[in-house]
């Protein structure tokens, strides 16, 4: 076998090992080598991986929008795994962080497998499928129930995005909606993934728009009724911005997303945001933001109201 082909095979195996660990139940689909040099990735394994799992509940069609995102992150090395979990609640345009923790754990062959912690617990079904995320602290109880799957999408780098029917349970109050279960993994020195947007609406509308990082292009997936769509490349622009002085950056408050063929057009406006400026070097700081958004989705000439979540990041 020529040396170059052997090197490519070893690097592909390393990437597959990295992403195989990313799901709790099924392996991720094969991925490409975009953004990685074979000389850098050959012989590497899951030990230098960064893993991200996002589970987002969202109401559909209710008078008042409710969003409950859980963000799980893990950074794996030969010394162990650094973990971080955040739980947020959005109601009435206000964002509340109700859970947050960081800790270290021993080295493991499955660093991306999410773990319970303190007042946050997990219910896992047959085959390791995540079924519920529970939070209980004093008199406060909040549960996200992940129900029947309705859409299953995957990216070119092995990312998986699954949309489910779902519920949020607040004590004795139960609210129906949808749940996005999102898995991404990368090597530590690979381009950092960018922002992503999840939208819902009537006619079982679901739209996911993702920046893979390292490129200005976005990819989008969608469902309307029984029809499924994928747009390998969509163009995003910030049509209105505001200054975020803490980070010395502009952040968007209105968005326009279009597919080159004109089949998809999305217009969004901020309806409630939470911005943070993590520590960084230099006067310009990173931005980590959550936006509740409302707007419209024009799909194949049909216009539908939409609302959802923008997970905004600037490195």
Image: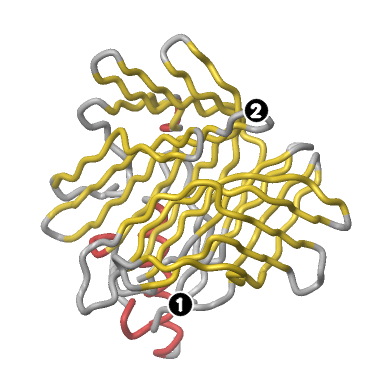
Q: Residues within 10 Å of mark 1 (few under 14, many from 20)?
A: few
Residue 83: x and y in percent read 22, 48
Image quadrant assignment for residue 224: top right
Q: Are marks 1 and 2 in contact (CB under 8 Å)?
A: no
User: SS for tag 1?
Assistant: loop
Check the image and name the residue furthest to the top: 172
Tag 2 residue: 62
Residue 196: x and y in percent read 52, 58
Residue at the image position 75 percent from the left and 55 percent from the top? 229
Q: Quadrant of the N terminus?
A: bottom left
Tag 1 residue: 214
Residue at the image position 25 percent from the left and 40 percent from the top? 100
Horizontally, is 188 left or right of 200 in the view? left
Q: Quick check: 167 above or below 300?
A: above
Residue 240: x and y in percent read 58, 68
Query: Counting residues from the N terminus, which is met first, the one under dot 1 or under dot 2?
Result: 2
- In the rendering, which numbered label is found on residue 136? none
């Amino acid at each position: 076998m020529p040396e170059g082909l052997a090197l490519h095979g070893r690097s592909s195996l390393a990437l597959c090992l990295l992403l195989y660990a990313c799901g709790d139940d099924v392996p991720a689909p094969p991925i490409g080598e975009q953004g990685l040099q074979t000389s850098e990735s050959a012989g590497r394994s899951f030990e230098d991986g960064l893993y991200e799992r996002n589970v987002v509940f969202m109401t559909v069609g209710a008078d008042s929008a409710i969003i409950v995102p859980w963000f799980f992150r893990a950074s794996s090395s030969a010394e162990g795994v650094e973990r971080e979990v955040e739980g947020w609640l959005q109601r009435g345009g206000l964002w509340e962080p109700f859970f947050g923790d960081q800790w270290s754990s021993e080295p493991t062959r499955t660093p991306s497998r999410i773990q319970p912690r303190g007042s946050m617990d997990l219910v896992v079904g047959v085959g390791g499928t995540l079924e519920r995320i529970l939070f209980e602290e004093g008199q406060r109880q909040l549960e996200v129930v992940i129900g029947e799957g309705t859409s299953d999408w995957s990216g070119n780098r092995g990312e998986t995005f699954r949309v489910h029917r779902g519920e949020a349970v607040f004590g004795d109050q139960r609210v129906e909606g949808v749940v996005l279960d999102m898995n991404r993994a990368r090597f530590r020195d690979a381009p950092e993934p960018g922002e992503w947007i999840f939208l819902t609406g009537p006619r079982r509308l679901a739209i996911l728009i993702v920046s893979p990082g390292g490129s200005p292009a976005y990819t989008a997936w969608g469902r309307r009724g029984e029809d499924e769509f994928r747009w390998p490349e969509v163009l995003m622009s910030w049509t209105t911005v505001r200054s975020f002085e803490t980070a010395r950056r502009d952040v968007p408050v209105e968005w326009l997303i279009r597919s080159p063929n004109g089949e998809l057009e999305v217009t969004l406006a901020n309806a409630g945001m939470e911005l943070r400026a993590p520590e960084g070097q230099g006067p310009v700081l990173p931005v980590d933001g959550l936006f509740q958004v409302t707007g419209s989705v024009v799909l194949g000439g049909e216009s539908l109201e939409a609302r959802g979540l923008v997970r905004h990041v600037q490195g």
